Every structure is written in structure tokens, then in C-alpha cells.
Image: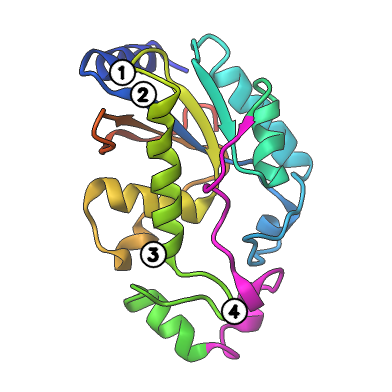
Amino acid sequence: MSRNATKLWQDIAKKGQIPLILARHGRTRHNLERRFVGKSDPPLDEQGLQEAQNLAMAVQNLELSGLYASELQRAKQTASAIGSPTVLEGIAELDQGELEGQRFEDVAQKHAAFFQQWHTDPDGLHTPGGESLNTCQERAVSALQSLRIHHKPGPPLLIVTHQMVLSVVLLHALGLPMRHWRLIKRKNTAMDMLGLDDSGELIVHHLNLAEHL
């Protein structure tokens, strides 16, 4: 990671905020095959394992005060390339319900009405048999806010999580409505840097750190 990133977290800490680096996990076979993957638990594929190593190299010179991952193995495998992660409850991927494991193109017609609303105004909409973006956002933001209990401003925490979690957390931090979730897409192992203040507010400082990709 560049020297600018080190200066960035130092500036965040000087403002009295806990620096948070949010990273997406490495690639899985489901990602490659364009399948819905939420609470299902595929491991990293060969490329994903290499991406995890690249992420580890990118942060190897960065002092970390904590390393966290969701309970899903693709996140834990990615974080384990860096160190020994602590599982952070609440940041697992959106539960995709009946869509889990299915290819995107295979379900578009079967759930046409759902997808139309999903892309235009998903506020409050649940995936068929699954979870809503609102619920995902509430639990993920609450989980990140809980880190104030054990940490204070200083070296950053690195947290490995998932695409939809990243989307809804950043929407919350930016004050944007849920219909903009598609604007925030991350390649595997891309990172964002936020600050967490003592009131629990999440402040976006830098989006899409991807020099290592």
C-alpha cells in the first residue's frame, strides 16, 4: 500500500476517528460463474487465493491494530493471508434466499418482477426467501460501530467482508438511498478507507483502493 495510505490513516486518527479499511474477499468459483452467493459458503478458487496473497502484500508494511472477517470462509481465507482474523458477527453477505447458487441469467425471467423493483427501488424489498438490503445494512453498520468498544484512534483495522455489505455500508456513510446500491461495486480484494468517530458515525475518506489489483 502506498505511503499516501499510511498518511491517510494517520490523518483520520488525528481527527479522533478509528481508521477502518474495508476489503472485499478474493474470488470464488461462484463469482467466476456469475452465481448468486450470499450465506452459501464456497471457498476461494485458485485466483482468489492469489488475490488474497496480493492483498496481504499490499498491506504488509501497514501497521494494523486489528484484523476482522465475516464468518464465511471466503472472507476468513482472504484475511488469513494477512494474519489471524477475528470473526465479526453481522458482516456476512446478504442472504440471497432462493437465488443462492443460481446463475444470474437463469433466474432473471423466473423472478422478473423482483428484479425490476430490485434495480429501480429495492428499499424494503427482500430477496425471494432471503433478506432485504435494509436488514443487511442495519446489522453491518451496527457491527462496525461495535468496534468502538475495543479500539480507539490509531493504526487501522482491516475488515474483510462482501460486495453487498460494502455497498450498503457505503450508502449509509454517504447518506445515499438504497436505490443507488449498484453504483458501488468492488472487484475482489479492493479496499475502501473509512473513519469511525466516537458517536458511531462512519465517514468515508477514500474509495476503491486498488493499486494491488
Mark 1 and mark 3: Cα distance apart in space: 30 Å
Q: How far from the left and from the top, in percent, is residue 166?
A: 44, 48
Q: Decide: marks 3, 2 in contact (CB < 8 A)?
A: no
Query: Could you tell me which secondary element the residue under label 4 belongs to?
Result: loop
Lateral position of residue 76 relative to residue 208, left or right: right
137 with respect to 53 (left or right): left
158 up-or-down from 185: above or below:
above
Counting from the top left corner in percent of width and height, residue 126 is at 47, 76
Q: Earlier along the polypeptide chain: callout 4 or callout 1?
A: 1
Q: Which mark is residue 19?
A: 2
Sort mark 3 into few (<14), some (14-19) or many (20+) by Cα contacts within 10 Å: some
Residue drawn at x 33%, y 77% as measured from the top left: 120
Which residue is label 1 attached to? 8
Residue type, mark 1 in image: Leu
Q: Position of residue 131 (x, y in %)?
A: 52, 69
Q: Where are the magenta residues, as a range?
A: 86-111
Position of 69 with respect to 7 (left or right) is right
Q: Secondary structure at mark 2?
A: strand
- Tell me how far mark 3 sits from mark 2, CA to CA: 24 Å
Mark 4 vs mark 1, CA separation in Å: 41 Å
Tell me which numbered mark, 3 or 2, is placed earlier along the sequence: 2
Q: Earlier in the sequence, mark 1 or mark 3?
A: 1
Q: Quadrant of the C terminus?
A: top right
Query: Which residue, given by chain and number where applicable, does mark 4 sit on?
Result: 129
User: Badges 1 and 2: C-beta atoms under 8 Å apart?
Assistant: yes
